[in-house]
């Protein structure tokens, strides 16, 4: 997943949280990463969609099977 985005008129409606929840439900036990990183202006987003998620969403090291740049 890279740079999830919702157009302004639908932001803060819970769409991204619902989408991520559906992905977690369909693929339990998977670890997710975003190649776009967690920029300062998106920390509140990741905190909100990570509420109730064990470990939340936070920056971690990239898995060894993922090569830099994709």
Image (cartoon, rainbow, N blue to C red):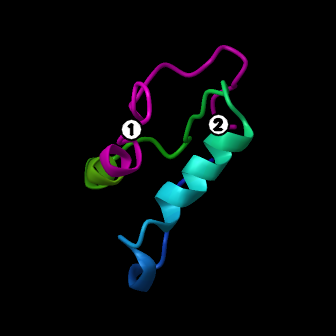
For mark 1, does the 10 Å Cα neighbourhood hold few (<14), some (14 to 19), or many (20 or more) residues?
few
Residue 14 percent coordinates (x, y) = 43, 66
- For the question of whether residue 2 can be seen, the reply is no
Vertical order, 54 against 34 (above or below): above
Q: Quickly name the residue at label 2.
A: 69
- The residue located at (73%, 42%) in the rendering is 26
Tell me the chief SS of the magenta region: loop
Vertical order, 20 against 32 (above or below): below
Residue 43 percent coordinates (x, y) = 29, 47
Which one is in front, 46 or 18?
Answer: 18
- The residue located at (35%, 42%) in the rendering is 51
Q: How many marks?
A: 2
Stretch in magenta: 46-70
**Dot 1: what SS?**
loop
- For the question of whether residue 26 can be seen, the reply is yes
**Dot 2: what SS?**
loop
Residue 52 magenta: yes
Residue depth check, mark 1 versus mark 2: number of the one nearer the observer: 1
Residue 52 numbered tag: 1
Which one is in front, 68 or 51?
Answer: 51
Whether residue 15 sits left or right of residue 44 in the image: it is: right
Which one is in front, 44 or 17?
Answer: 17
Name of the residue lying farthest toward the bottom? 9
């Amino acid at each position: 997943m890279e740079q999830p985005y919702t157009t302004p008129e639908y932001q803060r409606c819970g769409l991204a949280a619902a989408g991520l929840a559906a992905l977690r439900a369909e693929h339990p036990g998977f670890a997710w990463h975003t190649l776009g990183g967690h920029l300062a202006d998106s920390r509140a987003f990741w905190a909100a969609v990570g509420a109730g998620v064990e470990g939340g969403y936070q920056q971690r090291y990239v898995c060894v099977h993922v090569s830099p740049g994709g």
